[in-house]
Image (tube, rainbow, N blue to C red):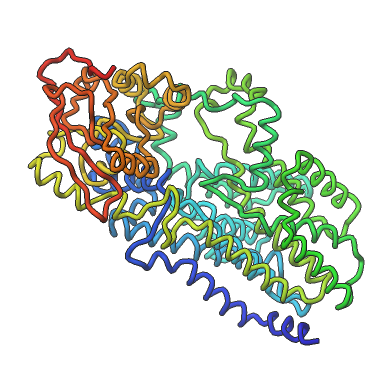
Amino acid sequence: MQLQKIDDVLKDTKVWIFLSFILLGYYLSPLFQTTFYVPVYDNLDSKVVWYKILAESGKIFAKNHTIIPNMMNGLPRLSYGSEFDLLLWFYYIFGPKTAYILNEIFIHLLAFISMFMLLKRYVVPQTKTYRLVPAFVGSLYFALLPFWSGSGASIALLPLATYSLLNIKNKNSTLWDWIFLILIPFYSSFILTYIFYIALAGLYFFYDSIKHKKVNFYFFSALFLFGMLYLLKNYRLFEALFFDPGFISHRTEFKVFYNVPLWEFYRLSLVNFLECHIPHAQTLTRYILPTILISMLLSLFRRKLSTKESMVIWIIILLSFVLDIWSTLLIHRYTLPFIALFSLFLLIYNKDNRKVPALMILIIILSFAGAAQMYEGFKGITHYIPTLKTLNFRIHFLLPFIYAITFSFALKTLFKTLKLSALFSLVFISAQFYDSLNASYFTTKKRLDYASFQSYYATNIFKQIKQDLKIKNPQDAKFISYGIEPAVSLYNDLYTVDGYSTNYPLSYKHKFKKVQVPKCFTNVDRKKVYDDWGSKAYLLCMDSRPQIHKLLHNSIKAKNTKFPFFASIEGLCNLNTNYILSGTELSNIDTTKIQFIKYYHSKQALWHIWLYKLNCSNSKYISNSI
């Protein structure tokens, strides 16, 4: 009886408003600390720097072919994305670190608010039976996911887009629904998320039209407007794709897709189903997927179980989590076929509860669709549609949103079938919150492959470097990094001949390859990274990841060893390189061609930096380290 009283208290909306405020506040709290750590990959090493370069370039509205000189000896304006991107203007107005913090806060708050709006109206309407607890739990699960900040609020705003479209389709919309649809494209990515979302919404439009034998022009108009706004935002990309490309992209040589056998394709599909995509769209299904499957089983009951029966079920459920039996069951090779067949069975024979099995089937389909681009059996399609070789088909990025909807429907089933469901919801969200904290993309604790803005970009060191070199015009000095990521130099307003870009001229990829030496290409993985992908035009013979750099530095201190420099001096000179920034002291070099200037380090910086000047007075020279 005491548990029942606690359960009754937990059905109070005010309790969950307070709990939501506390959990979201605690989750976001690292962002308000002076030092916090964020992922390096596809984040500090790229997105932050790209936005900063464009925001400070003075060429935000320039034509596609206008050169922005900072990276890779100058890249076309097209390489830096749209000016109609709200995140870009965060960087322009507030600067990189503040923009990063604001973006993270907005993403998680918008995820919670938009998901709650959708769930309250279309999934869990407020009734005396289960009230709004499933809506709060589903919204908190969604809001506490580790969203990739580089795509703005793309995934976080999917519930709001759905909410507005459904309101318009059902003809109970307000002006705000149209305003939301107009604003969402400017804080989200068409290529990463909404191209697939609009395609699925279009399929639903055709289904609805056939079902009702009538075209819903309000719904069609909303979808058309939504799609046209994305075309407007990404006009540069579509102009280059269909009219004037300006340059042949390095992506035309991509060989990273359509190259795995059938079994690996299945394994990747299972990974999508369980985790979606790390690091760009995680689902954290450790607790929610078992809960969904349990709710599907309980949906077979035609009555609400008694308190004693409910207690037995809850104990079994909790024990299954404590003993961690789900991790073994869900990674089995037959997991997807079994869940698909079970969902299909419920969809056909359980007419009272079809939404959860239908959504599970959709999740499985999207999991396979997201991995399809890797399967070698589909390679033949690229002969008819060559663009597929260069596009990353990320339809499974919709899975975090669909999982949140499915989970909320599952909770609704549990509330209808079992007593003490509100109490279980509190236990669940506590466990999920712990998982979310461990997976968060910002933290006050040091983690592998995470770094702080201060330590990664080492602004105090680079301030000293610029003072020592007395560089008046940044274009007069070109840098290359060895064992350090070029993003560090770029963030500190130095111009580089190397860099990381998702769309740059193929000719520069080939030109930069001449800087590499054959010895580096004996490593098959490094060769494949450059030849089959090539978005990172880095010197290959030394790993530039911060964690590797720490290990190397410890080795240097312990053994006092030096590292050879592997690069074609002639190639560097042809790229107009003036300086080398090395993460280690160089050995086996011709001191008449590479002159040591100074060693830099500080306690606040991640990197140890040796600065060298490159003497290109003799045009024909190859490093004696080759």
User: From the image, which quarter does the N terminus lie in?
Assistant: bottom right
- Residue farthest front in this picture: 559
In which image quadrant can residue 249 be found? Answer: top left
Q: Residue visible at 52% across and 32% down?
A: 391
Where residue 433 sits: x, y (%)?
Answer: 58, 65
Question: Residue 561 appears at what percent x and percent y?
Answer: 27, 34
Q: Residue 405 appears at what percent x and percent y?
A: 67, 58
Q: Position of residue 520 (x, y in %)?
A: 37, 22
In this rendering, the answer to whether 139 lies above or below 622 is below
User: Nearest the camera: 238 or 3?
Assistant: 3
> Where is residue 616, by image quadrant?
top left
Q: Quadrant of the C terminus?
A: top left
How many marks are shown on the rendered structure? 0
Q: Residue at x 53, y 25 (%)?
A: 389
Residue 157 appears anywhere in the view: yes
Compared with 127, 388 (above or below) is above
**Quarter assignment of residue 141:** bottom right
Answer yes or no: is residue 198 visible. no
Q: Is residue 523 left or right of residue 351?
A: left
Q: Is residue 98 above or below residue 129?
A: above
| Direction top: furthest residue | 620
User: Residue at left 50%, top 66%?
Assistant: 109
Compared with 118, 265 (above or below) is: above
Residue nearest the viewer, comparing 160 with 321: 321
Residue drawn 50% across the image and 28% down it:
390
